[in-house]
Amino acid sequence: MRVVVDTNILLSGLMLPNSIPGKIMQAWRENRFELVLSQFQLDEIGRVLAYPKIQKRLHWDEAEITQFLKQLFMRSIYLGDIATVAEVPADANDNLILSAYIIGNAQYLVTGDKGIQALNERYSILTAKEFVEQCHNQP
């Protein structure tokens, strides 16, 4: 199944491997779903991984960050640069994550963002907990 996972959940999963987001990262590492990723999100992840508070948690140097970004690129359905094809009324900054879900033909968009979750009647949007349960129920 193709899935777009919000950056906050991906990063939480890295920092807290025993958490629900950590279980999502583990499921991705075990190839239980295909991660759909745009260049915008890959850039965002790289930028956030360099933040001092994230560095304090992960203790990754520049080479480790680069290696992780390469792993994401190589093991995802990479969309490259994408156009905005849908809007999140609550926050225009979320337009590209929703657009990646649509352009990438993803089955789910996993996020904790309330503005995006408000669109769950139109799109298949799950919380991290709901997605972990969904993965657990997959054969």
Image (cartoon, rainbow, N blue to C red):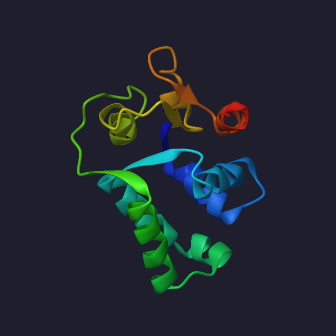
Residue at figure coordinates x 67%, y 73% from the top left: 57
**Residue 52 location (% of width, % of height):** 55, 76
Tell me if 23 is positioned left or right of 126 in this view.
Answer: right
Q: Residue furthest front?
A: 139
Image spot of residue 137 (x, y percent): 72, 31
* Image spot of residue 40 (x, y percent): 32, 54
88 relative position to 55: left or right: left
Instruction: Quarter of the image for the C terminus: give it.
Output: top right
> Would you identify the image quadrant in which residue 26 lies?
bottom right
> Looking at the image, which residue is at 67% across and 65% down?
15
Q: Nearer the viewer, residue 67 or 11?
A: 67
Across and down, in percent, residue 55 comes to 58, 76
Give the answer, above or below, for where 118 lies relative to 64: above
The residue located at (33%, 41%) in the rendering is 96
Identify the residue shown where x is 23% and y is 45%.
82
**Residue 11 lies in what quarter of the image?**
bottom right
